[in-house]
Image: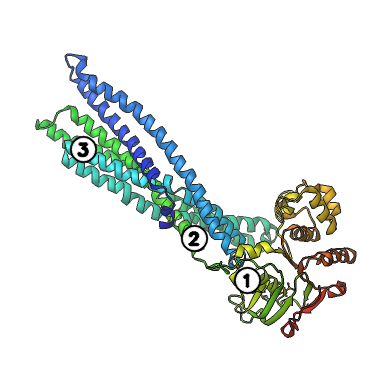
Amino acid sequence: MREALSLLRWPRTALAVVLGAGTVLSGAALLAASGALITGAAQRPSTLLALMPLITAVRFFGVSRAAVRYTERLVTHDVTLRMVTRVRARVLERLVPLAPAALTGARGGELLSRVRADVDELQGVVVRLVAPAGVAVLAGGVAVGLTALVSPPTAAVLAVLLAVLGIAVPAVAARAGRRAAVAVARADADVAADTLDLVRGLADALSGDGGATALRGLLGHLDRQEAAERAAARLTAVTTVCREGVPALGLGAALWLVGSDVAAGTTDPLLLAACALGVLGAFEAVGGMGAAWSAAGGIRAAAGRVRELGERRPAVADPADPRPLPAGSALRFDDVTLTYPGATRPALAGFDLAVPDGAKVALTGSSGAGKSSVLALALRARDPDTGRVTLGGVDLRRLPLEGVRSRTAWSAQAPQVLGGTLAGNLRLGRHDATDAELHAVLADVGLDRVAATPGLDGWVGEGGERLSAGERARVGLARALLARADVLLLDEPTAHLDPGLTARVLDRLARDPRTVLLVTHDPAALDGRWRVVDLAEAGADTGAPVSP
Ligand SMILES: Nc1ncnc2c1ncn2[C@@H]1O[C@H](COP(=O)(O)OP(=O)(O)OP(=O)(O)O)[C@@H](O)[C@H]1O
């Protein structure tokens, strides 16, 4: 909850609370002034001028209530919209450093729910929680204070009843409401499942006495559903009675207590209706507390999940005192060991490899040998447990993370193609690439047909579903080729290609002046320009420079 509150801009939130309280108090004052005016008129004053102050008060509070409510809505919406921006920014700020390694354990749907549902929940913290609670305290306090000026016992009764309606009733209702909602949801799910089973298995159920058994099961669940719904309806009825009944109790108490004072001659009769109706109006102060109480649980849970994101440690971090990026782009792995969290054996152990500036190196080996892990280390998606990985002779852990990532382009085994245009997807590699450059790179990777239809501005479908798996892989490859990087890390760039296309792509890569480290399951397709490193033997790699 502290997480959610820390995102608030308190001066504006306080203004929203003051205006909300102003609305409630204007309403109560309007009722009080009207009561006094009616009483005053019933006393048949000799001149209408005697009622002028009350007439003015009624007009004033009538107008002020609408004006204050309007301003309060403007301020509350402004606070909420600013909150939306801040919450989204904070969640993304926390997510970005965690990607990709520290998010591998999280399911995609769970992450989506965090950035959508939790953000939606948190952004309502002002409207649904802080403002109603603040208004209840402020408006309730002022109403009790003003009532005390007329009748201290009535003020005491009002304070108690406000606490009952603002704290006790919503707390009990929210707790019981959660239980009732769970019971109804369970019963609904059972009835739906039974009905579906019965309809799907109708033919089987009709033979033997299976039908009667299934029907008995369904009827049992229907009874449970009815009971759950009745319990939920009873709860709604009880809370409605409380919401209506407690203010009526307050009204009755005010009439009785202030009425006794008027009868005793210690209080002006004008104040009887004014005080009673003012007390009635004051209950609006706690009107939002039922919803606030229900919202509190959801907001607390959402804030907790967002905080948990912040507490996760990124797999790699920027060095405190980063070294400048080196000029060279030679990669070197020295006695590297990498064990994934929770894994029982290392993915890489004692791994050595030297990839000189501009060299073309292909990693091969059986599935699970650790080829993709080598690329992950070179991209600094992960750090080795022991040993070191260097770029241009400098340990990657001593270089600025953003600098390392800008020097390396990576194409995954199954690259992420976003729902958008082909050009938009390619320009993730280089945002200012011209159309001519995009056409050239598409031709390089054999995507000439896609470049023609749907074309650069054609929609590639959600997740690139309008492209084949091989075309999606080559979009990722084209993106990497476009990047202004000196090291290309390519995970199986030719996996889905026919031999002709494989040879064309490998030739394009071999002619690229940059350092290329690729993973392949098809070393036979590589010509003499490539140095093939079998991961099963990589521990024995001498690290001796090879000519590119
Ligand atoms: N995020 C991860 N968490 C836990 N273990 C992992 C993770 N990624 C890979 N591994 C494990 O590390 C080992 C090496 O995986 P890696 O992906 O590097 O192999 P690979 O040689 O690229 O395999 P393939 O050819 O099938 O792509 C495997 O045993 C794999 O199960």
> Quick one: 34 or 131, which is closer to the camera?
131
Q: CA distance from mark 1 to mark 2?
A: 32 Å
Q: Which circle, 1 or 3, is nearer the viewer?
A: 1
Q: CA distance from mark 1 to mark 3?
A: 71 Å
The local secondary structure at tag 1 comes to helix
Specify the amino acid type for callout 3.
Thr
Q: Earlier in the sequence, mark 1 or mark 3?
A: 3
Whether the residue carrying mark 2 lies under 8 Å from ligand 1 is answered with no
Q: Residue at x 31, y 28 (%)?
A: 61
Res 1 label: none
Q: Give residue 396's mark.
A: 1
Q: Position of residue 235 (x, y in %)?
A: 39, 49
Tell me, yes or no, if residue 534 can be seen here: yes
Identify the residue at image location x=39%, y=44%. Answer: 13
x and y percentages locating residue 452 in the rendered image: 85, 48
Q: Secondary structure at mark 2?
A: helix
Element on which disc 3 rests: helix
